[in-house]
Image (cartoon, rainbow, N blue to C red):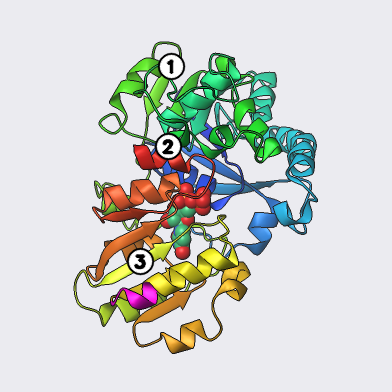
Amino acid sequence: MDTGEHKAHCLIVPLPFQGHINPMLQFAKRLTHKRVKTTLSLTRFILKTTNRLSAGSVSVRAISDGFDEGGRAQAKSSEEYQARFEQIGRQTLAELLLDLADSGQPVDCVVYDPFIPWVLDVAKGFGLLAAAFFTQSCAVDNIYYQVFRGELKLPIAGGEVAVPGLPLMKPDEMPSFIYVHGSYPATFQMLLNQFRNVDRADWIFINTFDKLEEEVLEWVTRFWRVKAIGPTIPSTYLDKRLQDDKEYGLNIFSSTTNTCVNWLNERQPKSVVYVSLGSLAQLTAEQTEELAWALTTCDKHFLWVVRSSEQAKLPTNFSEETSKNGLVVSWCPQLEVLAHEAVGCFITHCGWNSTLEGLSLGVPMVAMPQWTDRARTLSL
Ligand code: UDP
């Protein structure tokens, strides 16, 4: 439908976590470039606390997860967060859709994160088109779907696991919630709930690309209307079709851009080990200490992202004592770091965005998978 300047209006609704906002905001920018008006909805808490939001021509509007003061950390449990987000999210999303219609910008299509599947119900209640945007790999989505359908029975029995569309796998190549059956039950339930209504979605978008997951994409295309729309990396690092598109545009944590880049500028090409475990993973103090030892004894320069909430686990005076060889920061502009000629290696927790970023920028990776989809990402 052509509404004058724009072909249509798309509302993008991610789970308000860094690893979900990044790819969906990036996709929104691509739609805008194709003359589709896009509005990104973020929670009031994220909008209040976020650093330097720069969404370009993507409009940003608020909904609520019911925790406007503290976000996910304010909820006592994952169950409480999910339940309240669904209750308050449904109301505030409906209000937003009505408000956009009243102000002459009616939404035609909702692109939603299936971690919050109730968004699809709200969209369909308004008679809108809806597309699910999967932020994890197609292999992982397919494995969870088979569990949801009861085709893959848990706990896993036997030495090999057969999942259609994928090669035979060992149990420890499965996502951690499957391999360690019963771990994080509420989060695992959320992953299975992605599929509770997915058959009503008009499209399924997956942040992947055909050459990376050819076989499994071919399989899921038999029952879903799938488009592989990844990798959703800012355009500067890929096709350069969008002008000045160098970063995703939103950092939940404060970034130390200049410090990192100035420090990297002083290093020789391919001499630095970059270490990051993403926005959520938590090592034990013992694991942090082991990693610290590995970095100090490997005789290379290192740039290590240790989020503020994790820094107490570092050995005493670690940053000061290793400052000749290393730099510890609480958050960094990861794409700029990976693209820097001084970086020769990326030690990653294998989050799907980090994996796609390392692949897209051609940085050799050392995998240190932590939990959820990560074991499977490693075997990809
Ligand atoms: N990231 C960043 N700075 C950092 C660490 C991570 O900008 O210091 C970004 C990274 O580029 C990626 C996202 O945060 O886009 C993390 O997503 P991922 O799926 O890799 O892991 P998650 O945080 O969901 O575990």
Identify whether 102 is placed above or below 290: above
Q: Is residue 375 left or right of residue 76?
A: left
Q: Residue 112, position in %: x, y? A: 57, 33
Q: Residue 88, position in %: x, y? A: 79, 39
Q: Image quarter for residue 213?
A: top left
Amino acid type of the residue tagged 1 in the rendering: Arg
Q: CA distance from mark 3 to mark 2?
A: 22 Å
- Mark 1 or 3, closer to the camera: 3
Task: Say whether residue 39 is magenta.
Answer: no
Amino acid type of the residue tagged 2 in the rendering: Arg
N-term mark: 1 or 3: 1
Q: Is residue 335 left or right of residue 98?
A: left
For label 2, the SS is: helix
Residue drawn at x 56%, y 83% as measured from the top left: 316
Q: CA distance from mark 1 to mark 3?
A: 38 Å
Residue, disc 1: 225
Residue, disc 2: 376
Circle number at residue 274: 3
